[in-house]
Image: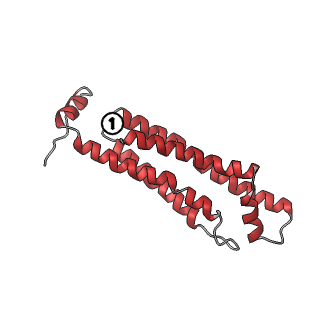
Amino acid sequence: MNSRTVMQLGLALTAAVAAVPLVDLATADSIAGHVRDAYPNWPATEVAKDRTAITVYLGTVGLLGIPCWLWAIRSAGRGSRRAPVLAGTLFTAGMCMALFGLTYASAPYERVLPLPYGLLGLLPCLAGLAAVVLLRRERADTPPSVTDEATAGAGRRAPSRTS
């Protein structure tokens, strides 16, 4: 499996994770149950407002991840030497968002986001970690002559490689 395949998997996981809260809203509505558990005395209108805010947050974070995956896939597909750095940066940002979602608490919530959603947010991060590792390995396995040819066409000096 190569880095592009793993990044495409990450893209698919991100899209799925972004869609899950919307599907839940239309079916089981577990987010509303989560809000009712935190605020048992709230009227239905207040529960609906909080449920909507949580659902919009989850969907927005997921939707923001999609262009990031597309950017990383495009960068890797072009053979950019910056692809591993870009993937590492995007992985770090995504992991920070996922950990925030998993751990953020605000009274009376033990966790603002339901635990299953926090854990789901980590799935694309696993693909991101695998992509970063594979990109670095692929970069290390690239013969210097291929790198020299790719950078020579851009009018740049090829980076020196030392063992």
Q: Position of residue 76 (x, y in %)?
A: 37, 37
Total marks placed: 1
Q: Which residue is drawn at 42% across and 34% down?
A: 74
Q: Residue at x 45, y 54 (%)?
A: 126
Mark 1 = which residue?
A: 80
Residue type (three-letter) at the residue carrying disc 1: Ser
Q: Nearer the viewer, residue 64 or 119?
A: 119
Q: Residue furthest top?
A: 153
Q: Residue at x 80, y 71 (%)?
A: 40
Residue 75 left/right relative to 97:
left
Residue 24 left/right relative to 136:
right
Q: Nearer the viewer, residue 136 or 30?
A: 30
What coloring was used for the rendering? secondary structure
> Does residue 108 sit above or below 46 in this rendering?
below
For the question of whether residue 78 can be seen, the reply is yes
> Does residue 111 sit above or below 131 in this rendering?
below
Q: Residue at x 72, y 59 (%)?
A: 30
Residue 71 left/right relative to 54:
left
- Crowding at dot 1, Cα within 10 Å, few <14 / some 14-19 / many 20+, comes out as some
Q: Which of 66 and 22 is in front in this view?
A: 22
Work out which quarter of the rendered image holds the N terminus and state it.
Answer: top left
Q: Position of residue 47 (x, y in %)?
A: 80, 62
Residue 52 appears in which quarter of the rendering? bottom right
For the question of whether residue 88 can be seen, the reply is no
Residue 136 left/right relative to 125:
left
Q: Position of residue 44 (x, y in %)?
A: 85, 61
Dot 1 falls on a residue whose secondary structure is loop
Q: Where is residue 8 in the image (x, y as percent from the top left)?
A: 46, 40
Residue 5 appears in which quarter of the rendering? top left
